[in-house]
Amino acid sequence: MVFAISGAMAANRSGMDIFGATFTGFVTAIGGGSLRDVFLNLRPIWVDDSNYLIAILIGVLISIAGNRQLHRLARTLTFFDALGIGFFCVVGVQKSLTYESTQTAAVILGVFSAVMGGVIRDTLMNETPLIFRKEIYATACLSGAIIYMILGSWGVDTAINAFVSTLTVSVIRLAAVKYKLSLPGIGG
């Protein structure tokens, strides 16, 4: 739902109509997980479970109805986005491992799960996707996915591992936003 809100808000900022906002909210919410599932040769879960579509629609409606109020809550949305990418990253790693991916592939697919919906959103908005800017976003996910693998190899309980890894992603992302941290650029 949070990713649907962010997609619909981006569409609202770009002056799209209600269909554009709904479509953008939808692809933002399901893009990363669907891409991961395609790579795993699985049918995306939203195809069979309409609860996902209902949550997305509710997110879009919240965005459309409360657009002005949501812009005032940008910090709150950044917090939920940071939690969301942490959660999606860890779930992506877990699902990839469940379907017998290599550890390296599971890390990559965890990052894909978390960030590719935003890449699709930004591309639709004709903006440079956030992961291609100097912001620390995908790097936070990469850190959390690697932490998940390390803790898993040490035999840490899955629930504790998931919590710590999600928290790692979220804290890195929130610190990067708060302190305007970024990766160095390349070239001169």
Image (cartoon, rainbow, N blue to C red):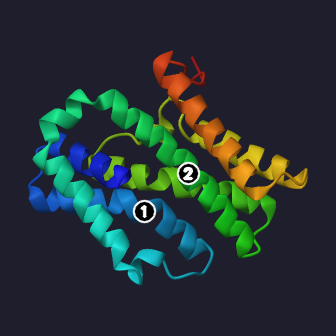
Can residue 180 be seen in this snapshot?
Answer: yes
Which residue occupies the foreground of this view, 66 or 13? 66
Q: Earlier in the sequence, mark 1 or mark 2?
A: 1
What whole-number distance in Å separates the C-alpha atoms at marks 1 and 2? 15 Å
The numbered mark at residue 31 is 1
How far across and how far down the image is residue 113, in percent? 54, 58
Q: Amino acid at mark 2?
A: Phe
Q: Secondary structure at mark 2?
A: helix
Total number of numbered discs in the rendering: 2
Q: Where does residue 138 sit, x and y in percent of width and height?
A: 57, 41
Residue 14 placement: quadrant = top left
* Residue located beneath label 2 in the image: 87
Tell me which residue sits at (22%, 56%) in the image.
60
Q: Residue 22 occupies which quadrant of the picture?
A: bottom left
Q: Nearer the viewer, residue 155 or 185?
A: 155
Image point 15% across, 41% down: which residue? 67
Residue 16, label in figure:
none
What residue sits 26% from the left and 47% below the top? 125
What residue type is disc 1 on? Gly
Is label 1 or label 2 in front? 2
Q: Residue furthest right?
A: 154
The correct choice, above or below, for 119 with respect to 19 in the image is above
10 Å neighbourhood of mark 2: few (<14), some, or many (≥20)? many
Residue 42 percent location from the top left of the image:
57, 81
